[in-house]
Each structure stands twice: as C-alpha cells, then as structure tokens.
Amino acid sequence: PLSLVVTAFAPVTAARKTLTPQLRTDKGETDLLLIDLGRSQNRLGGSALAQVYNQLGNQAPDLDDPEDLKAFFAVIQGLNSEDKLLAYHDRSDGGLFATLAEMAFAGHTGLDIKLEMLAENADEALAALFSEELGAVIQVRQADTEFVLMQLAAAGLGECAQVIGRPEADDLLSFSLDGELLLQASRVDYLRRWSETSFRMQALRDNADCAQEEFDHLLDAKNPGLSPKVKFDLNEDLAAPYLKLSKRPKVAILREQGVNSHMETAAAFYRAGFDPIDVHMSDLLSGALSLANFRGLATCGGFSYGDVLGAGGGWAKSVLFHAQTRDAFAAFFEREDTFTLGICNGCQMLSQLKDLIPGADHWPRFVRNLSEQFEARVATVEIQKSKSILLAGMEGSRLPIAVSHGEGRAEFRDAEHLKITEQSGSVALRFVDNYGATTQSFPFNPNGSPAGITGLTSADGRATIMMPHPERVARTINNSWHPDSWGEQGPWQRLFANARKWVD
C-alpha cells in the first residue's frame, strides 16, 4: 500500500519537564483522566485484541479531525508547563487496559477504574478497554481535576475527557462498570503476564538462568525499586573553590578508535575544575603529546577496536607492544602526584595494564556477561570503604548508575584470588539489589561478577577502575530517574570533585 513516512526533529526546550507513565503515590489524592481523541468510536480493527482472536476487524482507528490532535498537543504542553500533570501515557498497543496497566507497573500501585462514562454494557466496555484509538491517560491531583477538565473543554476537547479512576495503595488492578466488577487481578499477576512473551524470547536467546531470575523477581510485590541512599551532603560542592581559578590542572581524556564516552567524561571533569584535554592514542604513539604534562588520566568507555581481542584488549596491546608508550604509561602511574580513572572499556583496558600500575596486581580481568548479552541498564552500586581518592567520603552510599557493557564480569584466577582481593580493601564498588544487599542475582548484578564486585582501586588509591558509567549520570538531569530532592548535580559528580580536591 502507498504510505507516507515523515521524519521530523524538534528541540526540547525544557528537558526537566519530561513526563513518564510512572503513577505517583506521593502527591496526595489523585485522579486518572482519559483523553479520547477517537471520541468514543472505539474501533477495534487491527487491534491487539482482534489479533488474539485471529481477526482483522472491520474498521481501524483513525485521526478524523487533525484539529483535535493539534489542540490536544497544545493543551498538554500548557498543563505540563503549569505543573498540573503528574504522569502521562499514550494509548497505543493493547488499548486503554494496557496503558493503565503499564502506568501501574511503573508506579507500583493498584488501580480502581470505573467505566461508566465510557460504556453502557460489557461489550462496549470491552471495546473501550482494548480499542487503540488515539488518546492518552494523565494523572492529576484531585485539587486540579476541575481546572484540567476546564482547560480541555476550552480547547474543544471537553467531550473527549473523562475521569476514569484513581491509583490505589493496594496491589489490585480493578475495572468495574456500574458497580459490577469486570476484571480484577494483582499487579504482580498482570505484570508477569505482560512480561512472559519477552521472558520466553529472552530464555531462548540469552542465558536461560538469568532470564528466569529476572522473571522471578517480578513475584516480589514489595520490591521498593531504586532506593538511593546518599551518605554525604549533596549540596556541598567540593569543586566550588577551584572553578574561578585561572589555571586549571590538566586531565587527559584518553580515547581510542571506537571509544564514545569521552565527551561526558570531559564535561564532568570540567565541572569539577579541571582542564580536560582530548588525547587520542595516536597522539601518544606519535609523541605529539606526553602524559608527563598531565595530573590525571581518564580512560573512557566505548568499544575500542570493536572489542576484537576481547574488550579493551586491542587498546591495551597498543600500549604494551610499543616500548616508548609503555614506558610513558608506567612513568605516569609511578608518579605520586597523578590519579587514574578507568570507566567501562577504559576499565577493561587498564585491568590489562595492571602490571604497570603499582598496587594493582590483584585486579581481575573482565569477561563476557553471564547473561551472554550486552547489558544497558540502570543498576545500583554501594560504594565500599577503600583507599580510592576518587570515592573519598562516599562510603556506604547506594547510588543508581548507568551500565552499558557486554564484557563486564570480573573474573578472578580462583577463589583464593577473590578472597585476597576482598581482604586487601581494594574493592571499591559492589552491585546491590533494591533492598541494599550485595547481589549476584540478575538483573541487579547485570554482568554476574562474583560478590557483586564492579569497581576496584589500587593499593594507594590513586588508580580506580569501574565498569559502570558515573560520567553519564554526573548531572541529575542525565539520570533516567532520580529523587525530586536532588539538585543540579547528581551524587556521582562528587567523584570528579574529589579528584580536583586531591590534586590541589
């Protein structure tokens, strides 16, 4: 069939105003409103419901009046700018039922949904729940409900907007019509059903045990989700005294072919009062730049040489097999006025240079994730008591952090090697679950590292390596989720500020 594909781009002028489907339970009494741009037609053609019954349907949803969509967009933008919206989710695959269920999954809440304004009988209720007409569900404070409805009416969408229910503190998702219960099950039950297809595919494609672990975690109805615990003052900016100085210490932001996290790393160091210098390995190999001119070295994340020869292997060998460059790195690591940070691919690379780094002989190597897949997730780590100068004062904090790697599992020679490493005090970071316990369970430990180990430091604390990406979440806005109480800078910016304080 003939089709038109339109690609468009638009600036996001207020990134902090982004709405998610997460239902909020910390904002007092709230209502859920359906904005139905299908204007109660509830056409089921081509819907997921029709597919389940091997049907195509007679009439598919359509945008009958473009002015409705234009007005809808404008009023939603206005309400959002006035902080009247707590959550938002479009109606799409699976219709209203799937939309509401997904919002409950994200918010860990129950639902009390009443369909009287959408249907007069069970057949109409079925269509209202599973039609995939254009529209959205929004969550608003009950104190704002009347105002929101008035704004929608003023935009010509009064007939499209209905209050359909509210979140509940229990774990039940309930749908009723005129007092008669049509559907009810626990959030966990619906979530397991919603996730089962993905689980089956994951079990066939990836490590089946990891897939089962992740699926089984859905049974925990009391799972608190991400639960950060910051053990230092987030509002204290250790780097503040250094930001106005005319001369900044130089840190080498080292990259190689395939490295892609150098910009975020440079930005984090700059905000901490450093002068970050873009250094490519070719600059060092040719002698155009020398590590002797730097106080800090950051080896960045990415996929150097496409992870041929193992993650970080090609990068490390470009140092080890070039005598002059090897000597330059060894001299830098020996200098007591320098620090080193290795992140992700840089961590893998530095672990293969451990013979050059004083006090790093106990570091493991990093191999393929236990899940047998590249893992890009948000995980929680607990900062351990160690000599790491970069993590000073952060001990005991449990912080969400970006994870993005395929070969991040720490592999020790044997159990004795692992024991010695733990006893040496060089373990800097461990993965923990949502209850704060050190874990090897997937996906809280996304790579399967023993004892949750995902960051280490050298004997004197000047060299620290870690598989997660602190530079990608150094600003609060860069986190996919964060507590409302966090300010401009996220807790991971403290790592870079610690480096600046130490250099002074």
Image: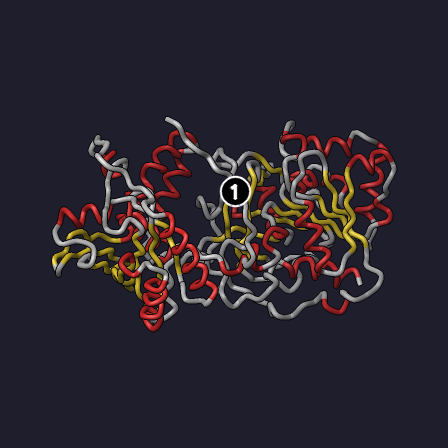
Whole-percent x, y for residue 332 in the image = 82, 46
Residue 231 occupies quadrant:
bottom right
Q: How many marks?
A: 1
> Which quadrant does the C terminus fall into?
bottom right
Whole-percent x, y for residue 111 in the image = 26, 59
Residue 51 occupies quadrant:
top left
Observer able to see residue 424: no
Whole-percent x, y for residue 181 in the image = 14, 56
Q: Between residues 221 and 115, which one lies in front from this camera angle? A: 115
Q: Between residues 87 and 147, which one lies in front from this camera angle? A: 147
Whole-percent x, y for residue 146 in the image = 31, 70
Q: Is residue 318 left or right of residue 104?
A: right
Q: Is residue 441 left or right of residue 406?
A: left
Q: Is residue 329 left or right of residue 178?
A: right
Q: Mark 1 — residue? A: 8
Q: Secondary structure at mark 1?
A: loop
Note whether 241 is above or below 299 in the view shown: below
For image coordinates 45% across by 63% down, the residue present is 78
Q: Is residue 345 left or right of residue 79?
A: right
Observer able to see residue 456: yes
Q: Between residues 177 and 244, which one lies in front from this camera angle? A: 177
Q: Between residues 100 and 250, which one lies in front from this camera angle? A: 100
Note whether 244 is above or below 219 in the view shown: below
Note whether 341 is above or below 107 in the view shown: above
For image coordinates 67% across by 35% down, the residue present is 258
Q: Dot 1, crowdedness within 10 Å: few (<14), some or many (≥20)?
A: few
* Residue type highlighted by circle 1: Ala
For image coordinates 19% across by 53% down, the residue present is 184
